[in-house]
Amino acid sequence: MKRAPRVGVFGLLGSGNLGNDGSLEAVLGYLRAEYPDAVLTGLVGGPDIVRERYGVDTTPLHWNQAEYETASGLRSIVLKGLGKLVDIGRTAAWVRKQDVVIVPGMGVLEATLPLRPWGFPYSLFLLSATGRLFGTKVALVCVGANHISARATRTLVRWSGRLAAYRSYRDDISRDAMRAMGVDTSRDEVYPDLAFSLPTPAADGTPGTVGVGVMAYYGGNDDRADGDRIYRHYVDTMNRFVGWLVDQGRPVRLFIGDQIDRQVVDEILEKTASPLVTAASAETLDELMHEMASVDSVVATRYHNVLCALKVAKPTVAIGYAPKNDVLMAELGLAGFTQRAKTVGFDRLVEQFTELENRSAELRQTLLERNEMNAQRLKDQFAALSAALFGGGR
């Protein structure tokens, strides 16, 4: 009798980022439909949440539970260094028990936000290296990537990609970036983001409501010295835009994509002090999509805030922080409704939002058509994944 496949999921999952967890939910849906007898485990950043929410047996990604806290003092520095050594054995022991490990979506090959090489890039390299050592197939599925200037991070990302058994990307710029960093991508495919395979909720809400997705944005990996100024400019502009909406008598629903973004929501609520402005409390991507379905139009920053709005066919302005936001908007038919978070301008935002609403009927129809195409493409992605990792479907 054939043994049930042992499948692991890996990443910063259950750590407060709704987009990451949405990608996990999409992959779990595929695995449970196609391989219901598979033994699922996870090496993840938030093991308790993933275990309780998704029913997956989990192991903490890091031995040092303060891995992503700033080291202050000799003891924390020593623990961080020791943790790097201990995690080699921990990762190897976990990987060795799996037949397949899937890294579901996420920008795991990116450095568009502040990132240190000894953080997640090191963890991902350990995964790919030990997978190759023990014959465990590691699959990077619909991941995001960008060309990375920092040498150490670039080296770890390049080898993480090279050593993986399977790679696919969520856009062409990700595949191009990996090719530019020395990875042979000739057999790698591009598919839509995994979240497009999740169920789409029905629209039901207050007419005229505007969704505003905000982010605690401090710039990218090369902007550390200027991070506070970038944050202040972005938050002040979003505050001003929400205030403008309130002056028009428009209800505003604030969204986040990561728990760290709540500080921006709190500031806007305090600044506007208006009953027209409320905050959503979504804790999963599915809940966020239901919240997005209840508004008429959206202005958002985080990639998966934008994606959720597009998936529920809401005309959207993207205040992005990386080219991936522009690519996503163009693919869904909303090229021209984007700005950069680092330099977002209030007057231009008002112009874009006004045009967006004037063209809302046309844009909604385009989004419905593009979403249907994306859902079909992801069926192709899961079929390709079955063939590559399991030798075909059930």
Image (cartoon, rainbow, N blue to C red):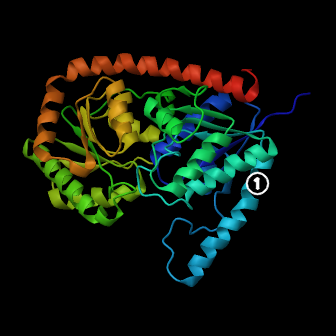
* Closer to us: 256 or 97: 97
Q: Which residue is mark 1?
A: 92
Would you say 249 lies left or right of 40 here?
Answer: left
Residue at image location 51% in from the left, 20% down from the top: 377
In the rendered view, tell whether residue 145 sits above or below residue 197. below
Query: In which quadrant is the C terminus drawn?
Result: top right
- Above or below, comparing residue 51 to residue 23 in the picture: below
Q: Amino acid at mark 1?
A: Ala
Looking at the rendered structure, the secondary structure element under dot 1 is helix
Answer with the quarter of the image where residue 382 lies.
top right
Count of residue discs: 1
Tell which residue pokes out farthest to the left in this image.
247
Quadrant housing the N terminus: top right
Question: Residue at (32%, 66%) from the top-left corner?
Answer: 225
Q: Residue 142: horizontal and vertical position, in percent? A: 54, 33
Q: Residue furthest bottom?
A: 74
User: Residue at the location (48% across, 41% down)?
Assistant: 145
Q: Position of residue 76 (x, y in %)?
A: 57, 78
- Residue 200 visible? The answer is yes
Q: Quadrant of residue 330?
A: top left
Q: Residue at x 52, y 32 (%)?
A: 169
Against 205, residue 122 (above or below) is below
Q: Position of residue 328 (x, y in %)?
A: 37, 31
User: How many other residues sit within 10 Å of disc 1, few (<14), some (14-19) or many (≥20)?
Assistant: some
**Is residue 259 shown left or right of residue 163?**
left
Question: How far from the left and from the top, in percent, is residue 151?
Answer: 51, 55
Q: Nearer the viewer, residue 159 or 325?
A: 159
Is 300 or 339 nearer to us in this picture? 339
Viewer-closest of 301 and 31: 301
